[in-house]
Image (cartoon, coloured by chain):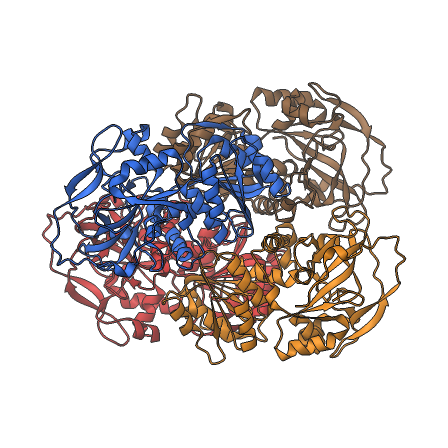
Chain colours: A blue, B brown, C red, D orange
Amino acid sequence: MTPTTPVTSERPATRSTPRATTMKAIVKAKSGPGAEVRDVPVPTCGPGELLLKVKRAGVCGTDLHIYEWDRWSQGRLKPPVTLGHEFVGEVIERGAGVIEFSVGDRVSCESHIVCQHCTACRTGNAHVCPNTRILGVDVNGGFAEMVTVPAVNAWKAPANVPIEVAAIMEPCGNAVHTAFAGPLSGCHIAVTGCGPIGLFAIGVARAAGAARVFASDVSPYRLDLARKMHADAVIDVSRGGFVEKVMELTQGQGLDGVLEMSGNPVAVRDGLAALRNGGRISLLGLPKESFELDWNRLVIFKGVTIHGIIGRRMYETWYQMDHLLASGRLDIRPAITHVMPMQEFDQAIALLRSGNAGKVVLVPWGENG
Amino acid sequence: MTPTTPVTSERPATRSTPRATTMKAIVKAKSGPGAEVRDVPVPTCGPGELLLKVKRAGVCGTDLHIYEWDRWSQGRLKPPVTLGHEFVGEVIERGAGVIEFSVGDRVSCESHIVCQHCTACRTGNAHVCPNTRILGVDVNGGFAEMVTVPAVNAWKAPANVPIEVAAIMEPCGNAVHTAFAGPLSGCHIAVTGCGPIGLFAIGVARAAGAARVFASDVSPYRLDLARKMHADAVIDVSRGGFVEKVMELTQGQGLDGVLEMSGNPVAVRDGLAALRNGGRISLLGLPKESFELDWNRLVIFKGVTIHGIIGRRMYETWYQMDHLLASGRLDIRPAITHVMPMQEFDQAIALLRSGNAGKVVLVPWGENG
Amino acid sequence: MTPTTPVTSERPATRSTPRATTMKAIVKAKSGPGAEVRDVPVPTCGPGELLLKVKRAGVCGTDLHIYEWDRWSQGRLKPPVTLGHEFVGEVIERGAGVIEFSVGDRVSCESHIVCQHCTACRTGNAHVCPNTRILGVDVNGGFAEMVTVPAVNAWKAPANVPIEVAAIMEPCGNAVHTAFAGPLSGCHIAVTGCGPIGLFAIGVARAAGAARVFASDVSPYRLDLARKMHADAVIDVSRGGFVEKVMELTQGQGLDGVLEMSGNPVAVRDGLAALRNGGRISLLGLPKESFELDWNRLVIFKGVTIHGIIGRRMYETWYQMDHLLASGRLDIRPAITHVMPMQEFDQAIALLRSGNAGKVVLVPWGENG
Amino acid sequence: MTPTTPVTSERPATRSTPRATTMKAIVKAKSGPGAEVRDVPVPTCGPGELLLKVKRAGVCGTDLHIYEWDRWSQGRLKPPVTLGHEFVGEVIERGAGVIEFSVGDRVSCESHIVCQHCTACRTGNAHVCPNTRILGVDVNGGFAEMVTVPAVNAWKAPANVPIEVAAIMEPCGNAVHTAFAGPLSGCHIAVTGCGPIGLFAIGVARAAGAARVFASDVSPYRLDLARKMHADAVIDVSRGGFVEKVMELTQGQGLDGVLEMSGNPVAVRDGLAALRNGGRISLLGLPKESFELDWNRLVIFKGVTIHGIIGRRMYETWYQMDHLLASGRLDIRPAITHVMPMQEFDQAIALLRSGNAGKVVLVPWGENG
C-alpha cells in the first residue's frame, strides 16, 4: 500500500474557492462494455445534500460487472452514469437544512439511498428497502472529482483511520453486517471466498473474538492475503476437501458459522455440510445462477439458519464498524493491495479480472496518491 | 371425531395387577413394504424408564413412508421394530430412580431419545442431537398395548386436554416449533401445506396473535380442514397463483413469515417470493429430492432468513404447547378426522394415501375408542 | 362509549375551503395549576409537515400532571403551550415535500418528535432519542381544532378502526411496546395497574396468545374494566396478597412476565417476587420517587431481566399495533369509558382525578361526538 | 504465578492403586467463624459420578463469607461440610453409567448441581434452577485431596490451559455469562469492580471485540491488575467521578454496557447514569443490602435493560469459555496473584480480607505447587 499523505496536510476547501463548472469522471456513457473518462458538470448540492471533493474511491466487483456489461447491468443501469459507490470525500458544500456536518469534514458514504417511507425503512430494515437507489449505479457516484450525496448517507470517518480505509467502509460494512448476523465470540467461523469482503470478514470475525477463523479460496494469491488478515488456517479448495479439512481442524465438531462471500454453489453446499447442527450460514456472495441443495440433509435435519445478506444495517453496522476501526481492533489495510490514479481505471479493472488483487483504491485527479 | 370416554372412567393400573408377558403390536417385521400385527414380549422397564399402557396413538406421514419402505426407511430401520412415535399412555410402572412421575399419570411423549452428552444436548439444542434415536423408528414405539420410554421423554398431559389431542402432542410440537421460530404476533403468516402439521400450525399462528393466517394446498379436502382451523383465507394452489393471491390479500405488502409444511419446491420458491423483504421462512416439510433456487432474487437481495426445523425444542416447545392447549387458546381437534382401532392399521395407511384424511388416531386393543 | 358516526359521513376538507385564522385550543397559558380554552392562531404547515383537523383526542395521566403543575411539569413546560399528545385528525394541508399522505387521510400521530441524527435515531432506537420533543408538552399539541405535525410522525389509521380508537393509538402503542418487550405467546403474564395503558396491555397480551393474563389494581372500578378486557383473573391488591394469589393461579410456577403500569413500588417488588426464575418485568409506570429493592433476592438470584420502557418503537410498534387493531385481534373499546366535548376539559380532568374513568376521549369544537 | 509442573508428568491414578480411606480437607466443622483442616473419609463414587483427585482449587469471596460466618452462611450451611467450589481434578474413578469421561481426564467443574426436572432445567435455564445445591456449600466440595462430583458437572479442561486456570473456570464462567448477556463487539463497556471476576470480565470483553473496556475500582492494587488485564482505561472511583470520566472517555456518548461486579449501590447507580439510552447493565455483584434507585431517570426514561446474573449457562457458557481459553483469545493468568498450599487456608483468607489479592489458588496436600 502506498504511504498516505497525512490527513492534516490536506487543505480544507471552502465555499469561497472559485469552483470549476466541469470535472473529470469515470462514466458509463452508453450500453455495452467499457467505461470512459469524461468531462461532466460539477453536481449541484440540493437541500439535505452534501457536495464532496472525492479523496479516494474503491473498485468493487460490481464495477467489473458493469464494465463488462453483464446481464444484471443491462437490466439495471441507464447510461450515462458516473460509476463508483465506495469512496471518501471532504465536504465542500452543504445543502439547505444540513446541520450535522461541516465544510471540511471527512466523510465516507453509505451507497444505498433509501425511500424512508416503506415498512422496511420505518422498522430499522432500510438495508432491504425495495425502493433503494444506489450511488454509482442508479445515480451518479464517486469515481469523479466531486460527488453529491444525501447528508443522511454520510458518515464522519474516524480521524485515526487512514484515508484508503475510510474509502472502503462501504464494502467493509458488508463484511461487518454478514459477520454480525450471528454469534462470533468463542465460535469456530469459516469465511468462504477471499475477495476483499471475505478478507475484511476474516478481520471482523477475529476482532469479535471468534475462537478460530478459517478462510477458503481457490487462489493462492488470495489465500496469502487471508493469512495476512490473520486467518487461523487457510484452506485451498481448488481440489475440494473443505468439509474434511474443517472437521480435522475442529476435531469433528464442525463450524458454528459460515460467512459465504464467493457465491459459489460448492462453497454454499460445503459450508452447510461443515456446519455443526444448529449453526448458521450468512450469504453475501452472489451466485451467477440458480443452484440446487439437498435441503433435507444440509438444512432441515441439521436445524440450520440461512441468512440472505445485503448492504449494511443503516446505521447500526456503521457504528459497529466505526468503533472497531477507530479502536484498532479491526485493521483491514492488508486487504488493500493497490492504490492507483483514477484515470487508470481500465488497468484497475484488468487487475480485478486477473484475480491477483485484493481491494484496489483509486486516487482522483489532483489528489496526492 | 368419535366421542371420547371421559378420562375419569379409566381405571388406573397398578403394579399389583398380574401382567401379561406378551402383547399385540404393529411391527415392521422385515425389509419390504407393509407392517403386521404381532404378538411380542411386553417391554421391560429399566432404570430411568416408564412403562406405559398406550391409550391412543397418531399415524404420521413417516409411518406411511416406513410402510411403503421408501429409500429413507431402507437406510434407517432395522426390522423387527414396533412402529408408532406419537402416543399417549398411562404410567403402569416406573423404573429405578424415576421420581417425577407416578403410576396412573397420563403422559404424552417426545419421540427423540437424545444422548445428553453432545454439544447440541448440552446447549439447549437437543432437538438436533446427532445421536438421536427415534421411538417407533430406531427403537420400539407406541403402536402396541404397552411401550417403554425414558422418563425424561415423558410429558404429563394437561388434565383438560382430550385424550386424542394428548396423543398427538408430538406432531403438534413440530408445528409449535416451526411457528415460534420467528415473530407471529401482529404478523401476516402463510402456512404452505395443510397436512396435519400444517393444520396445527394454522391454529398455533392464530393463537399467537398473527394478524392474518393464510393457508395453501392443492387439495379441496385439506383446504376445508384449514378453514375449520380458522385460517383467515385459504389459497388453492392447484393451478399456481400463490404469490399473486398473497399480494392481493396483503395489499402488496407480502408476508412476514411462511411456515413451510409441504416439502414442495414450488411452495418454497413461492413462499420466498411472497415474503416481504427481511421476512422469514421456516422449513419443516421434507422435499423428496434436491431442488434449486434463484438465491439472488429470492434470498440475498431480500435479506430473508431461512430456518431448517426438526423435532421440538426440548422442552421449551412442550411448555409452550402445553400452555396453549391447556388454556384453550389452541384447539387442534378439527384436524383429527379419524379415530379407529389400531388393528385396522392397514386401513389407516390407505386413508393417508388417499389424501382424504387429517390426523388419524388409533385406539389400541382393549381401549374404548 | 358513545356510538361513532360512520367514517364515511365525514366530509373531507380541502385546501379550497376558506380557512379561519384563529381556532379554539386548550392552552397551558402560564405557570401554575389549570388550563384554559383560548383562541389561538391556526398553526402553519411547513415543509415536511401536515396540518390536521383534529377529530378526537385522548386525555392522558400526563395531562393531569401538567394541569396540576407538578414538579416534572414545572421543569419541563414553557407556557403558553397547547396541550394534547394523543389524537387523530384529518389531513387538510400537506407541506412541501410530503408525498406519502393525501388531503383527507385520517391519521393518528406518534407524539415523539425526534432528532433523526443521534445514535439512538440512527440505530432503530428513536424512542430513546435524547433530543426528543413531545407534542402537547414541548410543542403545541392536539387539544385544538387544528394541529401541525411532522409527516414522519403521522400514521394512516386503518379504515375499520373506530375514530375513538384511532385517537388513542399513542397510549395503546405504549402497551404494545411494553408487552412485546418479551415473550407472550403461551406465557403467564400479569399486568400490574389497570389504568388505560394497563387495560390496553391486557388486550395486547391476550391477542398475542398469552396463556393466561392476570390483572391487578386497588380499584374495583378498574378491576371491572380489566374483566371487560378479558383478563383471565383479576387480583384486588388493596390489601396485598399479589404474590400468593399468583402462585395459587399458576400452581406455584410463577409468572413468565410482568407488565408494570402502576409505578407503585409494591407492585414492582411483588411483580419481581411473583416472576419465575429467568422471567422478565417491563416497567412503563413512572414511580413518584426513588424506591429500594432487595436486589439479591428479587433480581440477581432469580436471573431476572428488567426493561425500562418509554414511548413506542418507531415505527415497529405502530405496524404491530395497526395489524392487531385492523385484524380485530385487539379490541380496546372497553377501555374507553367517556367521550365528551373538548371544552369540558376541566370535567375530564376531574374524572381522571376521581379514578372512576378508563380512557377519556375528547371531541373538538364542531365535531359530532 | 508459580510455574506449573507439566501436565504430562502427572502419573494417572488407576483403580488398581490401593486407596487411602481418609484424606485431608478444609472443613466448616461447626457454626461460627473459621474453618479447619480435618481428616475425613474419602468420598464414595456413586452411579453417574466421578471421583477426582483435586489438583488445584480457587478461593472465592463466598469462601470468605462462609469463613466469617455471615448471615447468609448461617442460613444456608449445615456443618460439617468440606468447602471449595472452584477446582480442577483428575478422574480417578468413574461411577456406573458414566461413559463420557475416562480415568486420567483432567476436569474442571460446574459447582451448581441442578435438579434436571424443573421448568428452568428443562428449558435451557438450569443456572436458575430453584433446587440447586452447590458444591462446597450444600454438599462437600473441593478443598480436599479428593472430591466426588456428578459427571454431568464435569468439563474436560483444554489440554493447553494451565492447571491454575483450569481450577478457576467456575468463576471465569461467571464473567463470561455476565459479559455475554448483551452485545460486546464494537461496544464501549465498563466493568465496575475489579475483584477476580471483574478482572476476568475485562479479559472476556476485550476478547469479544469490545471497542474499549473501562474498569473501575477504589483499590490501586486492583486497578493495577485491571491494567494487566489490558483495560483500555482504569477509573479510580475512590472519590467518585465515574460518570464524568466515562463521558469524557466516550466523547459524551456513554456506555453500551456495564458489567457490574462490585455489588456497590453507587456503582450500580453510576453505571446506569453512564449508560447510553437503550444500553444494558448486567448485575453479578451481590449488594450487602437493599438500595434505592431513581427509576425514572436511570431506567425508564433511558429505556435501559437490567440483567440479574447468577452462575453460568449450563453448558453454553462453558463452551464459549473453553473456546476462548483454548484459542488463547482470553488469558486470565494476570488475575491469579497467589498460588499457595491448601493447608495455608487461613493465610489465603487473610489475603482476601486485605484486598491485596486477585485470585488465590490452593495446591492440595501432596500436589507439587
Q: Is residue A7 left or right of residue B170?
A: left
A364 or A73: nearer the viewer:
A364
Q: Is residue C218 above or below residue C206?
A: below
Which quarter of the figure is the C terminus of chain C placed in?
Answer: bottom left
Task: Please report the residue visible at 55 percent of the width from the left and 35 percent of the height from the top.
Answer: A242
Task: Please report the residue visible at 50 percent of the width from the left and 57 percent of the height from the top.
Answer: D182
Q: Most extreme residue toward the front, as rendered?
A: A2
Task: Please report the residue visible at 70 percent of the width from the left and 27 percent of the height from the top.
Answer: B77
Q: Is residue A329 left or right of residue D310?
A: left
Q: Is residue D88 left or right of residue C150?
A: right
Q: Position of residue B369 (x, y in %)?
A: 69, 31
Q: Is residue D243 left or right of residue B84?
A: left
Q: Position of residue A340 (x, y in %)?
A: 30, 44
A51 or D25: nearer the viewer:
A51
Residue C194 seen in the figure: no
Residue D123 seen in the figure: yes
Q: How many marks?
A: 0
Which quarter of the figure is the N terminus of chain C placed in?
Answer: bottom left
Q: Position of residue C302 (x, y in %)?
A: 59, 62
Q: Position of residue A8 (x, y in %)?
A: 28, 61
Task: Please report the residue visible at 72 percent of the width from the left and 38 percent of the height from the top.
Answer: B89
B113 or C49: nearer the viewer:
B113
